Image: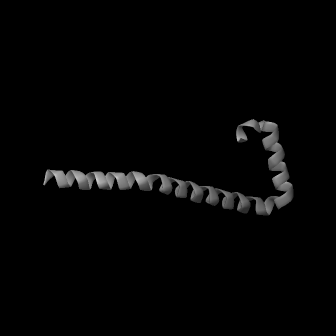
Amino acid sequence: MLSNIGIPGLILILVLALIIFGPKKLPEVGRAVGQTLKEFKNSARELTSDPIEDIKKETKEISDTFTK
């Protein structure tokens, strides 16, 4: 999706953001977007890692049962 923007499009987006938010608000907006993306990535990682951890735990319990 974003790979089709190109350099001129990216410059246009940055200029529009600067006009809309102004130079004082732009760092705050960037920080907020970064924190949101970080939170989203952590949540997505949690959702995908939970089943893997559950499978590992169950596999360990089963192997412990057979080794006794």
Q: Total number of numbered labels? A: 0
Q: Is residue 45 left or right of residue 17?
A: left
Q: Quadrant of residue 34?
A: bottom right
Q: Is residue 6 left or right of residue 63?
A: right
What x and y, as percent, mark residue 16? 85, 51
Q: Is residue 10 left or right of residue 38?
A: right
Does residue 28 sit above or below 8 in this rendering? Answer: below
Q: Residue at x 80, y 59 (%)?
A: 23
Does residue 3 sit above or below 34 in this rendering? Answer: above
Q: Residue at x 56, y 54 (%)?
A: 41
* Image quarter (top left, top right, bottom left or bottom right) of the N terminus: top right
What x and y, as percent, mark residue 65? 19, 55
Q: Is residue 29 left or right of residue 20?
A: left
Q: Residue at x 26, y 53 (%)?
A: 60
Along the line of sight, the residue nearer the viewer: 13 or 57: 57
* Image quarter (top left, top right, bottom left or bottom right) of the C terminus: bottom left
Q: Quadrant of residue 37?
A: bottom right
Determine the residue located farthest toward the left in the rendered image. Answer: 68
What x and y, as percent, mark residue 22? 83, 60
Q: Residue at x 72, y 41 (%)?
A: 2
